[in-house]
């Protein structure tokens, strides 16, 4: 079955008890046993819940994996993956990274004896050189947030394989519709389902997908032991979002490409970062390892910080938020918002400046979005 069909049908047969066509929200903590130890596979909802099972079965299929575990948030999913490691283990991390992941690694996990080396993974040799005898994991994002750099997933998988380490890909920005890292050799895929998978800015969640039974078993054990599960209502909402992921991604991407092409020629814009532009440094790699170019574009404005701030505050269709991936268009100022937790020098090293603005176009009409951005640029023009 193709992606669109799996999104609607996998894990979502009619409810055996009632015939309900839509997977019910099993708002229950526990399950009545017919005799001691006799049950239908569900004992207590921290361990398993049928609404969650439906979401996980569908999401595993869309990523091309065997197993999926969902979590209360993307960060809970990341924490779950870290719990595969032990004190003294070393992780090689692509340094162009979601701010919350950086914070978890450097300020929380490091206190438990895990060691992290941050490298520019767009140069693949840096990844190989950072591997040590105790390296157990390689962690990358591609495309990266917010500069949309591309990391070669297959090359990282080969390095991981040789080092006997696991490659984890945070696939949030690409979504399973546009990229399937397991097919490229990755061992685990992590998602913040809060973004395009949920897709409607109304539910926080995370997921890990793998085809390795041992990894899946340990992840299940540690999730049940530590408890970072999503509730049934959240699973229902995420599954509902998942059904239209393909339709939404096509429109998000079309709008991103249209905006990128409009902004490239704009006199107030210094630079447009979008993998769909032929002169983007990751364009060819994106064409090879993705099924599209994604739904985020980042721009640097000529007028510096005043223009960037004014621009963010002047759009009407784009809401100024911490977040991405909603059906409504979203705009953010990485310097002080999503990447506020990075030191200034590190932001600069990543290419994030006071003039950088990140756009997550929704599924509105593309011409309307171009008009909105054009008007906001005019307003921002006076600020510089
Ligand atoms: C949002 C995000 C996360 C964290 O997910 P939450 O659901 O907010 O906890 C991790 N990685 C990326 C790339 C993200 O965009």
Image (cartoon, grey):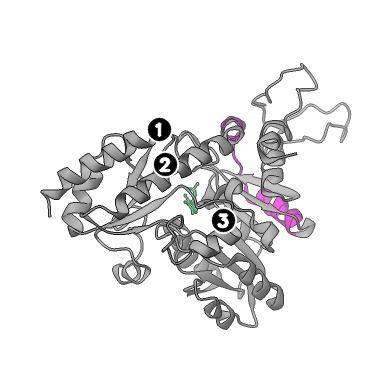
Provide the residue designation for mark 1.
364
Would residue 147 appear left or right of 233 to someone viewing this image? Answer: left
Can you say whether 189 is above or below 315 in the image?
below
Give the number of the mark in front: 3 or 2: 2
Which residue extends farthest top?
18
Can you say whether 68 is above or below 133 in the image?
above
Can you say whether 181 is above or below 322 in the image?
below
Give the number of the mark in front: 1 or 3: 1
- Residue 162 seen in the figure: yes
- Quarter where residue 241 is shown: top right
- Quarter where residue 356 is shown: bottom left
Q: Which mark is residue 255?
A: 2
Q: Nearer the viewer, residue 100 or 365?
A: 365
Residue at mark 2 to residue at mark 1: CA–CA distance: 8 Å
The response on whether ligand 1 sits within 8 Å of label 3 is yes
Is the C-beta separation of discs 2 and 1 under 8 Å?
Answer: yes
Q: What's the residue at 56%, 48% (across, down)?
A: 175
- Residue 323 seen in the figure: no
Q: Which quadrant of the figure contains the N terminus? A: top right
The range drawn in magenta is 215-239
Q: Looking at the picture, how far across and down is residue 198, in whole percent?
A: 53, 37
- Quarter where residue 181 is shown: bottom right
Q: How many marks?
A: 3
């Amino acid at each position: 079955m193709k992606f669109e069909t799996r999104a609607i049908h996998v894990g979502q047969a009619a409810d055996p008890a009632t015939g309900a066509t839509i997977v019910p929200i099993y708002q229950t903590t526990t399950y009545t046993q017919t005799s001691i130890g006799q049950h239908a596979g569900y004992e207590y909802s921290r361990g398993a819940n049928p609404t969650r099972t439906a979401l996980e079965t569908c999401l595993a299929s869309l990523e091309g994996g065997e197993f999926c575990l969902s979590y209360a948030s993307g960060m809970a999913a990341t924490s779950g993956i870290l719990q595969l490691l032990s004190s003294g283990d070393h992780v090689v991390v692509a340094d162009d990274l979601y701010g919350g992941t950086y914070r978890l690694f450097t300020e929380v996990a490091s206190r438990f004896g895990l060691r992290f080396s941050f490298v520019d993974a767009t140069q693949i040799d840096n990844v190989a050189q950072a591997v040590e005898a105790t390296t157990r994991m390689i962690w990358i994002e591609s495309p990266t947030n917010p500069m949309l750099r591309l990391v070669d997933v297959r090359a990282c998988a080969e390095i991981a394989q040789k080092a006997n380490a696991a490659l984890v890909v945070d696939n949030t920005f690409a979504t399973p519709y546009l990229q399937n890292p397991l097919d490229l050799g990755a061992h685990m895929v992590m998602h913040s389902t809060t973004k395009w998978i949920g897709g409607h800015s109304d539910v926080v969640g995370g997921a890990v997908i793998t085809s390795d039974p041992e990894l899946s078993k340990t992840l299940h054990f540690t999730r049940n032991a530590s408890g970072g599960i999503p509730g049934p209502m959240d699973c229902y909402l995420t599954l509902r979002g998942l059904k239209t992921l393909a339709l939404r991604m096509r429109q998000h991407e079309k709008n991103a490409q249209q905006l990128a092409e409009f902004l490239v020629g704009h006199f107030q814009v210094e630079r447009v970062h979008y993998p769909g532009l032929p002169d983007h440094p990751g364009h060819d790699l994106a064409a090879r390892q993705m099924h599209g170019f994604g739904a985020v574009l980042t721009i640097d404005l000529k007028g510096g910080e005043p223009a960037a701030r004014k621009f963010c505050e002047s759009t009407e269709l784009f809401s100024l938020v911490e977040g991405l991936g909603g059906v409504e268009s979203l705009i953010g100022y990485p310097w002080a918002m999503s990447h506020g937790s990075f030191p200034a020098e590190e932001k600069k090293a990543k290419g994030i400046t006071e003039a950088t603005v990140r756009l997550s176009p929704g599924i509105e009409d593309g011409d309307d979005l171009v008009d909105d951005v054009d008007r906001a640029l005019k307003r921002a023009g006076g600020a510089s």
